[in-house]
Image (cartoon, grey):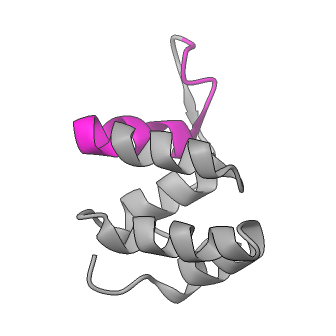
């Protein structure tokens, strides 16, 4: 990724304080995916660095899974519901 979107950078600063922030920023900067996928990864990780790594690996396998998990509720149900868009900035 060329540059981390401002909303993602702010979320990383909030969710990964101290030394972990450098590692989280480095991991996200190395991703070769869209801002939507990056937002999905960071959203799903919810401040857990190991989960951030897992979601980054999952996105490398199939980025659609990560976006689906981030944007939909009840994604294991027959009719999952889209409840958010990772096209929009993270709160």
Residue name at image x 45 percent, y 38 percent: 68
Above or below 80: residue 59: below
Q: Quadrant of the C terminus?
A: bottom right
Magenta range is: 59-77
Report x, y in % for residue 56: 40, 48
Furthest toward the front, the residue is 19
Report x, y in % for residue 66: 43, 41
Above or below 41: residue 57: above
Report x, y in % for residue 58: 37, 37
Above or below 50: residue 49: below
Q: Nearer the viewer, residue 52 or 69?
A: 52
Number of callouts: 0
Magenta highlight on residue 60: yes
Magenta stretch secondary structure, dominant: helix
- Side (left or right) of 28 relative to 30: right
Residue name at image x 49 percent, y 53 percent: 41
Above or below 64: residue 2: below
Q: Quadrant of the N terminus?
A: bottom left
Magenta highlight on residue 45: no
Residue name at image x 26 percent, y 84 percent: 2
Q: Is residue 11 visible?
A: no
Residue name at image x 59 percent, y 44 percent: 50
Furthest toward the top, the residue is 78
Q: Is residue 72 visible?
A: yes
Report x, y in % for residue 29: 37, 74
């Amino acid at each position: 990724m060329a540059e981390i979107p401002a909303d993602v950078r702010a979320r990383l600063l909030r969710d990964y304080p101290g030394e972990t922030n450098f590692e989280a920023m480095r991991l996200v900067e190395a991703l070769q995916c869209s801002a939507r996928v990056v937002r999905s990864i960071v959203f799903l990780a919810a401040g857990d660095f190991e989960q951030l790594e897992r979601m980054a690996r999952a996105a490398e396998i199939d980025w659609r899974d990560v976006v689906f998990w981030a944007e939909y509720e009840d994604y294991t149900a027959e009719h999952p519901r889209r409840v958010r868009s990772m096209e929009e900035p993270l709160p």
